[in-house]
């Protein structure tokens, strides 16, 4: 997906947003032009892309008005995402009732899944964060990168309309949905597999913790008997357990064939 524009589009400066001098201004401009290439969309109003990447912590530090951060764009993008994913699932799963469609949509647009999609870009590298948020690992925090993903959808919608926003969502979120749903439901799915095929229950063992209290990483193993089925790492124990369960399911599928999940 590329919106056709003149190849000699001028590099715009954004004095109303950046206040740290021309060098940082140009550095960030180059950074966002790179992001455009990665997402395959060129903005007519480049300010919208920048707004989508401005976290409230950066806005506060640089005295940017509230409407300059990405929270309002996130609100809009969330609505566009819900409509697009609902339409997609409605047409793809014609035999599923409303309740099952709702569950599938929840697995696709939940915070961990959106963060997973955002990291594939990787969107976190392009966020403008305040120094405090930067130092505490904000670029890797699910809540921040998933919000930025929704803000980016909102920015594309305002800039290029629903069709372009829809195409972005299909390309970066509504792809590989079976694996994404599996990731969302991994602990529950793994437990169902274990109960149906093994006598023992799976256990989640915290192996180690790293980092300061405000930015910890947890390492967890999914263990069946004495065998480690999967390993996971996350900034919360729950996220690490989910990752370990997901890896365990993939391992069991490879060992046992196409197990029913």
Image: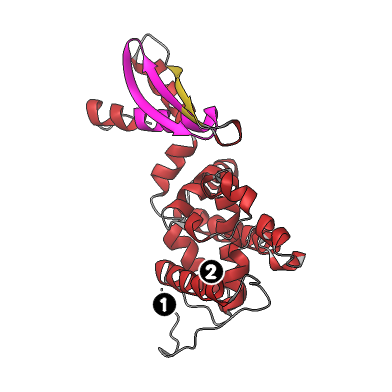
The N terminus: image quadrant: bottom left
Give the number of the mark in front: 2 or 1: 1
Residue 141 horizontal/vertical position (percent): 55, 44
Q: Assess whether residue 104 is covered by the magenta stretch.
A: no
Q: CA distance from mark 2 to mark 1?
A: 12 Å
- Would residue 247 appear left or right of 74 to someone viewing this image? left
Q: Which mark, by number, is residue 235?
A: none
Q: Assess whether residue 224 is covered by the magenta stretch.
A: yes
SS at badge 2: helix
In the displayed structure, 117 sits above or below 234; it is below
Residue at (58%, 57%) from the top-left corner?
148
State how the image is colored.
Answer: secondary structure
Residue at (50%, 45%) from the top-left corner?
113
The C terminus: image quadrant: top left
Say if residue 208 shows up in the picture.
Answer: yes
In the displayed structure, 37 sits above or below 200; it is below
Q: Which residue is mark 2?
A: 165
Who is closer to the viewer here, 50 or 92? 50
Residue 152 horizontal/vertical position (percent): 56, 64
The boundaries of the magenta stretch are: 219-248
Marks 2 & 1, CB-CB < 8 Å contact: no
Say if residue 106 shows up in the picture.
Answer: no
- Would residue 254 appear left or right of 11 to someone viewing this image? left
Question: Which image quadrant is residue 251 in?
Answer: top left
SS at badge 1: loop
Q: Which mark, by number, is residue 2?
A: 1
In the displayed structure, 70 sits above or below 253; it is below
Who is closer to the viewer here, 161 or 142? 142
- Would residue 13 appear left or right of 92 to someone viewing this image? right
Residue at (44%, 38%) from the top-left corner?
183
Identify the mark nearer the N-term, 2 or 1: 1
């Amino acid at each position: 997906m590329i919106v056709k524009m003149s190849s000699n589009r001028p590099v715009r400066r954004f004095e109303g947003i950046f206040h740290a001098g021309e060098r940082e201004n140009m550095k960030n401009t180059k950074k966002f032009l790179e992001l455009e290439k990665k997402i395959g969309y060129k903005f007519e109003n480049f300010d919208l892309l920048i707004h989508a990447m401005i976290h409230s912590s950066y806005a506060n530090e640089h005295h940017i008005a509230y409407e300059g951060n990405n929270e309002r764009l996130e609100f809009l993008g969330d609505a566009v995402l819900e409509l697009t994913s609902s339409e997609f699932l409605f047409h793809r799963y014609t035999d599923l009732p409303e309740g099952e469609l709702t569950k599938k949509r929840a697995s696709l647009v939940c915070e961990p899944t959106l963060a997973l999609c955002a990291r594939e870009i990787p969107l976190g590298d392009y966020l403008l964060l305040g120094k405090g948020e930067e130092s505490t690992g904000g670029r890797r925090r699910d809540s921040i990168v998933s919000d930025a993903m929704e803000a980016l959808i909102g920015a594309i919608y305002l800039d290029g309309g629903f069709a372009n926003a829809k195409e972005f969502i299909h390309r970066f979120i509504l792809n590989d949905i079976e694996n994404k749903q599996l990731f969302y439901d991994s602990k529950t799915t793994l437990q169902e597999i274990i109960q149906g095929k093994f006598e023992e229950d799976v256990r989640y063992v915290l192996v180690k913790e790293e980092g300061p209290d405000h930015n910890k990483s947890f390492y967890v193993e999914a263990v069946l008997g004495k065998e480690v089925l999967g390993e996971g790492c996350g900034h919360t124990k729950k996220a690490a357990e989910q990752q370990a369960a997901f890896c365990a399911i993939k391992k069991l599928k490879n060992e046992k064939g196409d197990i029913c999940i």
